[in-house]
Image: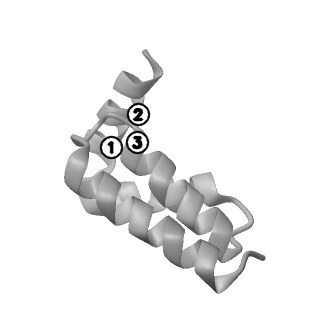
Amino acid sequence: MSTLAERRKARKDYLKTVKAKPVGEGSRFKAVEKSARLSGAENPGAVAASIGRKKYGAKRFAAMAAAGKK
């Protein structure tokens, strides 16, 4: 597990990314994934995907994931 300072920095970086980067680019997903990893999640990618599906819906999130893989 990481230190509190590392987790706070990851959260701050995430908030900065959310304001600066457009949706569907992948940088927001990576920021959430990093924050989840530092918080101790076993599978941070799954945590980020779950949050994305809840926020954008399964259809739109799948479209963004497909665009990100191209």
Mark 2: secondary structure? helix
Element type at mark 1: helix
Mark closer to the observer (3, 2):
3
Find residue 65 and name its label: 2
Identify the residue at image location x=69%, y=59%.
43
Identify whether 13 is placed above or below 25: below
Question: Which corner quadrant of the image does residue 1 belong to?
Answer: bottom right
Tell me the quadrant of the picture where the C terminus can be found.
top left
Mark 3 lies on residue = 27
Query: What separation in Å lies between label 3 and label 2 (alpha carbons)?
Result: 12 Å
Q: Earlier in the sequence, mark 3 or mark 1?
A: 3
Residue 53 image offset from top left, x and y in percent: 36, 55
Residue corresponding to mark 1: 61
Tell me if 20 is positioned left or right of 52 in this view.
Answer: left
- Image: 44 above or below 23: below
The outermost residue toward the right is 1
Q: Amino acid at mark 2?
A: Ala
Tag 3's secondary structure?
A: helix
- Amino acid found under the numbered disc labelled 1: Phe
Identify the residue at image location x=21%, y=40%: 22
